[in-house]
Image (tube, rainbow, N blue to C red):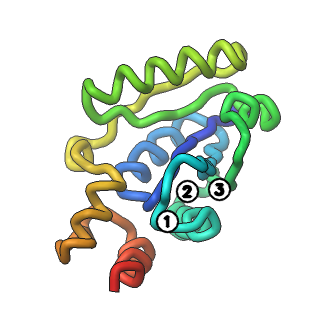
């Protein structure tokens, strides 16, 4: 069974994330979303909320699961016998960071490869920060996030 890890903050999950996950689900037997616990970030949603929202969003993906971790992702991959990490790549500016992370993860765990996937062009401009900013300022983001996420983010800013 070939497992892939899809790590991220997912604060909140967007259709861009889901597009990448659907592509990964076609390539691997199991996709494990890992909600990262990063003490240097100040997320809008708690870890538990992000895990819940992701679980609700992936309902249609039979071969996907969601968990969270405070560990290095390379170690998490080793413990879960994953063969790869999936990362989304939206713009050339993302490449430098993702390349650096891929190389470090390879050095920490040479048994895991990083695969960079490009989302559908209708989601290429999306990121969670932009979504939060638009909602905070009263804009409509329904076409970019699952309904459960839309309700949750509206509640946060009401």
Question: Mark 3 falls on what kind of element?
Answer: strand
| Residue positioned 39% across, 75% down in the render | 153
Spot occupied by residue 73 in the image (x, y as percentages of width and height): 66, 34
- Say if 42 sits above or below 2 in the image: below
Spot occupied by residue 93 in the image (x, y as percentages of width and height): 27, 27
Lower position in the chain sequence, tag 1 or tag 3: 1
What residue did someone put label 2 on? 61
| Residue 144, picture quadrant | bottom left
Q: Which mark is residue 66?
A: 3
Spot occupied by residue 53 in the image (x, y as percentages of width and height): 53, 68
- Say if 154 sits above or below 67 in the image: below
What residue did someone put label 1 on? 57
Q: Nearer the viewer, residue 111 or 139?
A: 139
| Residue positioned 42% across, 49% down in the render | 17
Spot occupied by residue 105 in the image (x, y as percentages of width and height): 62, 21
The residue mark sitting in front, 3 or 2, is 3
| Residue positioned 44% across, 19% down in the render | 99
* Residue 59 in view in this figure: no
Question: Mark 2 falls on what kind of element?
Answer: loop
46 left or right, relative to 1: left
Question: Mark 1 falls on what kind of element?
Answer: helix
Query: Distance from label 3 to label 2 (Cα)?
Result: 11 Å
132 left or right, relative to 134: right
């Amino acid at each position: 069974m070939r497992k892939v890890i899809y790590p991220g903050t997912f604060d909140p999950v967007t259709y861009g994330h889901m597009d990448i996950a659907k592509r990964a689900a076609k390539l691997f037997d199991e996709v494990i979303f890992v909600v990262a616990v990063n003490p240097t970030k100040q997320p809008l949603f708690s870890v538990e909320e992000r895990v819940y929202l992701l679980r609700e969003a992936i309902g249609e993906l039979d071969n996907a699961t969601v968990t969270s971790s405070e560990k290095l992702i390379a170690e998490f991959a080793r413990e879960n016998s994953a063969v790869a990490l999936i990362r989304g790549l939206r713009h050339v500016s993302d490449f430098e960071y993702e390349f650096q992370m891929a190389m470090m993860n390879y050095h920490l765990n040479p048994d895991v490869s990083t695969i960079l996937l490009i989302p559908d062009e209708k989601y290429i401009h999306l990121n969670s920060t932009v979504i939060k900013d638009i909602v905070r300022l009263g804009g409509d983001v329904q076409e970019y996030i699952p309904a459960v996420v839309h309700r949750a983010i509206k509640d946060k800013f009401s």
